[in-house]
Image: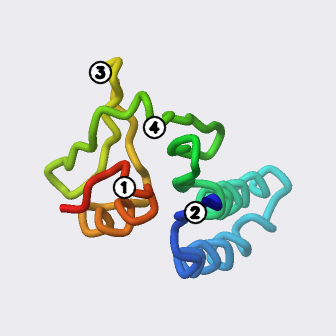
Amino acid sequence: MAVARLRMSRTALLPVVVLAFCVLPLATATPWLLLLLVVPAALAAWVFRVGVDVAEDGITVRSLVGARTVPWSELAGIRVAGRGDLWLVTTADTQVRLPVLRARDLPRLAALSGGRIPAL
């Protein structure tokens, strides 16, 4: 099974580009205000980096600065939060949020898991 990468839609970059254009005149006013351009750059990096990888060895959750892999053997279940957010529940009774997936994505996640997550 190849690695399935579930990422945020690249259309989320449109507001980041608009923000960058709006900040640009202010950022060029003085050299210190150039630091304002860090905000759109960090948001763009977040859109590209954050996601979930489903592979043969487990599920890897990627954040802006790190990643955590939960092997299939340590996966106890999936919790659906009140707003539809998905959380991995491990056998050690810890929880890991799946950042780009919602309850509507459960059938796709079940299909990618190769039967390890039952389809609801």
Residue 7 rendering spot, x and y as whole percentages: 55, 65
Around disc 2, counting alpha carbons within 10 Å, would you say few (fewer than 14), some (14 to 19), or many (20 or more)?
some
Position of 12 relative to 34 (above/below): below
Mark sitting earlier along the chain (3/2): 2
Residue located 26% across and 69% down the image: 104
Mark sitting earlier along the chain (4/1): 4
Q: Are marks 2 and 1 in contact (CB under 8 Å)?
A: no
Q: Are marks 4 and 3 in contact (CB under 8 Å)?
A: no
**What residue did someone put label 4 on?**
72
Residue 10 rendering spot, x and y as whole percentages: 59, 77
Residue located 45% across and 62% down the image: 112
Task: Identify the amino acid type marked 1.
Answer: Gly
Report the mark closest to the observer, 2 or 1.
Answer: 1
Around disc 4, counting alpha carbons within 10 Å, would you say few (fewer than 14), some (14 to 19), or many (20 or more)?
some
Position of 105 relative to 58 (above/below): below
**What residue did someone put label 3 on?**
93
Around disc 1, counting alpha carbons within 10 Å, would you say few (fewer than 14), some (14 to 19), or many (20 or more)?
few
Q: Which mark is residue 115?
A: 1
Check the image and name the residue furthest to the right. Answer: 31
Report the mark closest to the observer, 4 or 3.
Answer: 4
- Taking 71 as reference, is 44 left or right? right
Of the 4 image quadrants, the one containing the N terminus is bottom right
Task: Identify the amino acid type marked 4.
Answer: Trp
Q: Give the quadrant of residue 30.
A: bottom right
User: How far, Cα to Cα, is label 4 from label 3?
Assistant: 14 Å
User: How far, Cα to Cα, is label 4 from label 1?
Assistant: 11 Å
Around disc 3, counting alpha carbons within 10 Å, would you say few (fewer than 14), some (14 to 19), or many (20 or more)?
few
Of the 4 image quadrants, the one containing the C terminus is bottom left
Task: Identify the amino acid type marked 2.
Answer: Ala
